[in-house]
Amino acid sequence: MRELDPLLHSQLRLAIMSLLLSVEEADFVYLKEKTEATAGNLSVQLEKLDTAGYIQVTKEFVGKKTRTSCRITDTGKKALEDYIDALREYINL
């Protein structure tokens, strides 16, 4: 059996990746609302996914406010596909 990717084997990180898979881009506020995570925890998890190359984080100014947006990378899509395939092996689908 293949090992499950420990980076994706976290409820919040898996939720973030799943949300980003279904949209072209999502901003921090959207991800925070959908995952019901605290801002601090979400920031930490986004940083981990960004460092791994699974997502791309862009920070910009919109007026006087900062806007953080995220998108899944090809590496992230592949990692999520592999994770799902590994889960299927565990449950014999």
Image: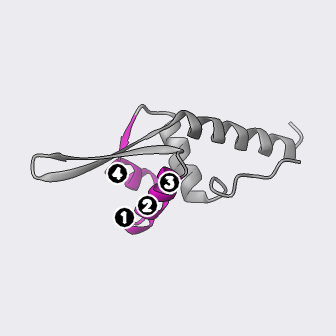
Label 3 crowd (10 A; few <14 / some 14-19 / many >=20): few
| Residues drawn in magenta | 25-51
Please tell me whether residue 87 belongs to the stretch shown in magenta.
no
Number of labels in the image equals: 4
- Determine whether label 4 and label 1 are within 8 Å by CB: yes
Residue denoted by label 3: 51
Instruction: Name the mark on residue 42.
Output: 2
Residue denoted by label 4: 28
Please tell me whether residue 27 belongs to the stretch shown in magenta.
yes
- Determine whether label 2 and label 3 are within 8 Å by CB: no
Residue denoted by label 1: 39
Label 4 crowd (10 A; few <14 / some 14-19 / many >=20): some
Q: Which amino acid does label 1 sit on?
A: Ala
Residue occupying the point 44% across, 33% down: 23
Which type of secondary structure does the marked residue at label 3 adopt? helix
Cα separation, mark 4 vs mark 3, equals 17 Å
Tell me which numbered mark, 4 or 3, is placed earlier along the sequence: 4
Question: Left or right of 36: which side holds 61?
Answer: left
Across and down, in percent, residue 41 comes to 44, 66
Please tell me which residue lies in front, 21 or 55. Answer: 55
